[in-house]
Image: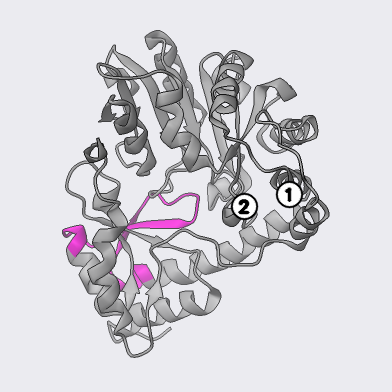
Amino acid sequence: MFDRLPEYPWQKLKPYQAIAEKHANGMVDLSVGSPVDATPQVIQDAIKDATNAPGYPSTAGSLEFREAVAEWFGRRRGVQLTPDQVMPTIGSKEFISFLPLMLGLGKGDVVVQPSVAYTAYVVGAALCGAEIISEDDPNKWPENTKLIWINSPGNPDGRVLDVDQMRSCVRRARELGAVLASDECYAELGWGRWAEERIPSVLDPRVCEGSYENLLAVYSLSKQSNLAGYRAAFVAGPESLIKPIVNIRMHSGLMMPAPVQKAVIAALGDEEHVAHEREIYRKRREVLLEAIKAYGFEIADSEAGLYLWATLDENCWDTVTKMAELGILVVPGEFYESKGSKYVRFSITASDEKIAEGAARLTNALGLTQ
């Protein structure tokens, strides 16, 4: 029963980590997208004030929590929701991994994911015995598709789907009678064009054409608010989907702790810390992007989010080896692409000092100076 899932992919990086760690000045880890900056004080204060929580929290989330999420969606995403169209989750990965099971999918059903995809979508399909297909073109989604994942901004590639592209996905999903779940966790971290223009949600009225039927928007505060350790996320969609999913989660005991709900409320009500963290990441991205390009990498997409999707036009593991020999750990594209990949993922979540050190190693490797 345990063979439904492959070995956790990051285990394959261990030998390359060992190489990188031997560098005279230590390893620069650009592989994991885990925040390193402090959780904003406004959020820390909120959870401290909520530590007296002796009773069980509501699986559906407190009314105050759901109202805060609905208000945030209206203010930041242009989406109008009622509290009954919102629910908390214990981080977004938990929800992503178990959604196919909660929807009752099984053998003979198809789950669609992007052609370059975060690893949790495969897990969800495997846990319930469904087939996983990697396909970006809605016209190629098969008739027995029951769940479609889109990810915008994407992990690892930072690809952003515009309104027209998302609308095409919604229309095809409705033709199939499938649930369309949109993983939108990096929507506050846009670069270039998307630094000024709102990254669309699947629940944006321009996208969903006035109906939330069979649509789910998944969001996490791990990145924008440095809350990865809090497991703070939520889902929004029609009550016809939210209510039965909440019921399943009640039976399973899946509840966001009450103090974390208070932390989320504080985080969503404070835009200043998000703007501050976005600026930190913008500067780190510029430093690393310049060095990566100088080394000879070509960058694809990377329009938003916390990663640079880059290639030297060679097998991704050859690139991972080259970077490890410089003391830099990156992620091979093989983790995210179903076919052979020539890409690697650089994360910009390391500290300023580590980003600067990694950039220096890349430029110095070619005899360049910053």
Please name the amino acid that badge 1 sits on. Answer: Ala
For image coordinates 42% across by 22% down, the residue present is: 169
- The C terminus: image quadrant: bottom left
Local packing at callout 2 (Cα closer than 10 Å; few below 14, some 14-19, many 20+) is many
Query: Mark 2 and 1 residues: CB-CB less than 8 Å, in contact?
Result: yes
Q: Residue furthest front?
A: 54
> Of marks 2 and 1, which one's residue comes earlier in the chain?
2
Which residues make up the magenta segment? 292-317
In the structure shown, which secondary structural element does the residue marked by tag 2 occupy? helix
Indicate the position of residue 162 as horizontal and vertical percent values: 49, 33
Residue 241 in the magenta stretch? The answer is no
Please name the amino acid that badge 2 sits on. Answer: Tyr
For image coordinates 76% across by 45% down, the residue present is: 262
Q: Is 147 on the left-hand or right-hand side of 89?
A: left
What residue sits right under mark 2 in the picture? 230
Indicate the position of residue 216 as horizontal and vertical percent values: 54, 25
Task: Name the one closer to the observer, 233 or 334.
Answer: 233
Query: Quarter-wise, where is residue 55 in the image?
Result: top right
Q: Residue furthest bottom?
A: 24
Could you tell me how many numbered marks the image carries?
2
Task: Name the one closer to the observer, 54 or 329.
Answer: 54
Residue 309 in the magenta stretch? The answer is yes
Q: Is residue 295 visible?
A: yes
What residue sits right under mark 1 in the picture? 263
- In the displayed structure, 269 sits above or below 102; it is below
- The N terminus: image quadrant: top left
Local packing at callout 1 (Cα closer than 10 Å; few below 14, some 14-19, many 20+) is many
